[in-house]
Amino acid sequence: MNAKDILSLIHPAIAVAFVFPIVGIVVNFALQTRQRRLHPNESKKIPPVVGREHLKYGRWLTGSVVGVTLIALAYSIFIKQPFFTGKPPFQMGFIIAMFVFTIAALVLLYRTRPNQPLWRAVFATLSSAGLIVLGCQDGVFRRTSEWYLSHYYFGIVVSILMVVSLTIVPEIYKHQRWRVTHTVLNTLAALLFLGQAMTGARDLLEIPLSWQAPFLYQCDWQNRVCPEPQSSQPVEGHVAKAPRF
């Protein structure tokens, strides 16, 4: 593996080591919080801090999901293909500015107060729009023909769902309908996380190392056949050595 291949592992490594454990923690606290709210007399063993812990780890989850998505997009745009070769200066500046813009919008969303619903909606919309615009750039593998099995589309949708969930947190303490909306959105997000795990593992199997790519991209992926490699005949009087791994 060269440096390019190692950089490609940053996104899945962070997802496995950090994001998915937080998903499990958030789901666990969510179930305990719901159990304590619906059956207070039967849930004395559940500590009263589960709601606060659910909120804290939920905020961490939103930031980590959006962050790991931005890392994947940055790798696809800047490293997977030579982005700075032959691109107009305006396009290069625009893409870099969009990354800064999206991160700034998310930070400002975290800093908004509960009594500022308009600003929460504005920053949530801006950060979500930034993710969508960056995902439409060249170099990002989207698998649009199979969007229902696409790691990219699952990731973008679950990132936006996390942003929306963070945005409506103050409202779920005021209105029952927002609490129901929060539950529905996060149930969908949990299913998408499962889809992310499956499609991510599939994509890791399909993506070749950089030195293998020139040959493998000659294959007919539809018919699952590859060109025959050129056989190398040993030179007379020379004993071929076994390959070293």
Image (tube, rainbow, N blue to C red):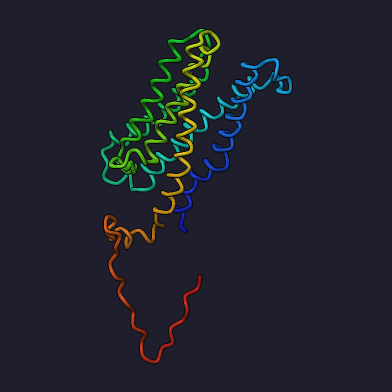
Q: Is residue 115 above or below residue 243?
A: above
The image shows residue 160 at horizontal and vertical percentages of 42, 27
In the image, 228 versus 78, the foreground residue is 228
Q: Nearer the viewer, residue 194 or 244?
A: 194
Could you say which quadrant of the image residue 146 lies in? top left
- On screen, residue 128 above or below 198: above
Instruction: Residue 155: name its quadrant.
Output: top left
Q: Residue at x 43, y 20 (%)?
A: 124
Instruction: Give the residue at x 63% y 21%.
Output: 35
Using the image, determine if residue 105 lies above or below residue 23.
Answer: above
- Outermost residue, right side: 45
Query: Of all residues shown, which one is farthest toward the bottom?
Result: 237
Foreground of the two, 217 or 112 = 217
Q: Quadrant of residue 69?
A: top left
Q: Where residue 18 sits in the image (x, y, percent)?
A: 57, 38
Q: Residue shown at 34%/83% (left/top)? A: 233
Q: Position of residue 49 (x, y in %)?
A: 68, 20
Can you give x and y, in whole percent of width and height, for residue 102 in the image? 41, 27
Q: Residue 4 or 175: which is nearer the viewer?
A: 175
Residue under the image location 30 percent in, 74 percent down: 230
